[in-house]
Image (cartoon, coloured by chain):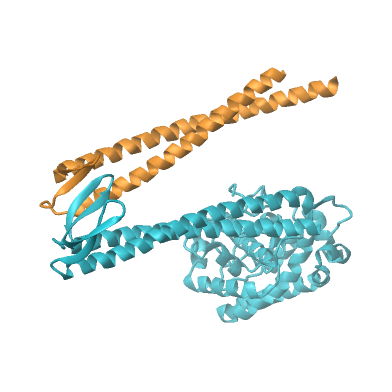
Chain colours: A orange, B cyan
Amino acid sequence: MQRDLESKANALSKIQKDVSKNHQVRKQYTIQVGENELVLKELELVNDEANVYKLIGPVLVKQDLAEAKANVKKRIEYISAELKRMDRALKDLEDKQNSKKESIFKLQQKMQAVQTKA
Amino acid sequence: MAAATRKGTATPLGAVFSPEETRRAVARVTEAAAGRRAELARLQGFAADNAALVSLVQRLPDELSHEIMVPFGGAAFFPGRLIHTNELLVLLGEGYYAERSAKQTTEILRRRGMELEAQVEAMKATIADFEAEAKFFESTAAEASEGLVEIREEYDEGTEINSSTLADASSSATGMSDKNRVHAQIMARLDELEMEEKEAGSSSEEDGEEDEEDEEEDAGPSEDDEEEGDVLSDDNDHQNASFGASFSGSGRNDQSHGSAQPKSILKKPVGKEILKGASLAPSARTPHSVFPGQASIINSEIQLPTKKAVSFQDDNKHIIGSSKSSPLPQCPEYSSSLLKVSSDNTSHERKIISSGQKQAFTGSIIEHDANMSTFQPSKSEDLQNPAISPRPVSRFKMQKGGR
């Protein structure tokens, strides 16, 4: 019984770590999405003749405005999809976490009952 | 209050919220608030930088070229000139740069500044929330350590009403003994006043309301004492509760008597009355001013147009959150029994409404335009015999609608 409890506790802590990691990644993604949306807004405001450059490593490369806009839009979509996926994964993890907690709790109760009997 | 017959529980606050834990909660919340404050400082630094940049960019195109000391390497400078002063490569984010003129750059920077400001405001709001939480915890901890006791009693409406006149002794705990004594007088006066109001109309409303408030107050306590054992409830809560009760009562009436009346009731003048009542109510420190008009304000300044009745459930004597009852001026009779009403949505006072309403209202509804208090004397006795099934006064269960 003890061993069972320990293994369950380990699984629970692992799940909790996953949940916190998920949170962090989600936060990062959210920030990125925000930034990309800002960029898109500015790009819309730039008139067609202006030059847009992209920083690739140490090089500033001239980019076509339309192309740049398309790229940013795609990035936004990609990140949002990722965010949604993470949300679902987070929910799953949380459900699992809760069920594990319950089973641990029940196990603990059983153990207490056994101990009091003995 | 038949305290003797009723069972109650007195739980020291300290047991429910141990002072130690509350203090720890306070520490936690203040920590979180401190973290947020650091973030806020960072954001404000950004905002300051942005402003400095805007002023710099605006000065650049003033000259064809600027004489400057150009940094060279890590620790050297050489004199040089800044040319093309109107052409700037602005970082838009995510590695994207755009060539813009100075004016366009200031536009971009200004937009960024607004974004930053919005973030700063949001951060300030969260910090304020945290601080409020911390204050609440702090006060709970202080109360718990002082040994404040939460008292809960079962509310048995039948016994309550019957014993209301003898309530003096029992009311000492809640400090409402005075009201109990006057209860009977109040009831009689209430009846009179209602007649008066009927005749006088809206003009006398304010006065009537005030009178009613006082009266209601007295009437209320008797019922109150029995039901509410919670020492911590505020007067305001009572007020709200009573308003809510009368409000819901009227709502109920609507229900039972069709929707025709609510329309009449919901006229603007009524609304005004209600507003008046509401403003009066807070000033009157009567815990139970069950003035229907007032109640309606609490419940629905916005809800005036909705005629949905009720908050009362037929089988349930509890008042439901006043969210939907339209103010029907006919509930004055219930005022005495409506002492406990769950107040408007925001306040969570849960008091049991004497169930008398359901039974009491058997006649037709008297329409009173702008006159909230229409007492129907014939029905007053009905109010006295509510048959509420005794149940523990769980404040949170009392509300209908699962609020």
* Quadrant in the rendering for residue B141: bottom right
* Quadrant in the rendering for residue B332: bottom right
Q: Is residue A105 visible?
A: yes
Name the side, left or right, on which B238 lies relative to B149.
left
Residue B69 or B367: which is nearer the viewer?
A: B69
Q: Position of residue B272 (x, y in %)?
A: 52, 74
Residue B108 or B258: which is nearer the viewer?
A: B108
Name the side, left or right, on which B205 lies relative to B193.
left
Q: Quadrant of the C terminus of chain A?
A: top right
Q: What residue appears at the point 25 percent right and 41 percent down from the top-left corner?
A: A73
Residue B106 or B264: which is nearer the viewer?
A: B106
Name the side, left or right, on which B316 lies relative to B299.
right
Q: Position of residue B115 (x, y in %)?
A: 35, 57
Residue B206 or B344: which is nearer the viewer?
A: B344
Q: Position of residue B258 (x, y in %)?
A: 53, 56
Q: What residue appears at the point 24 percent right and 64 percent down from the top-left corner?
A: B57
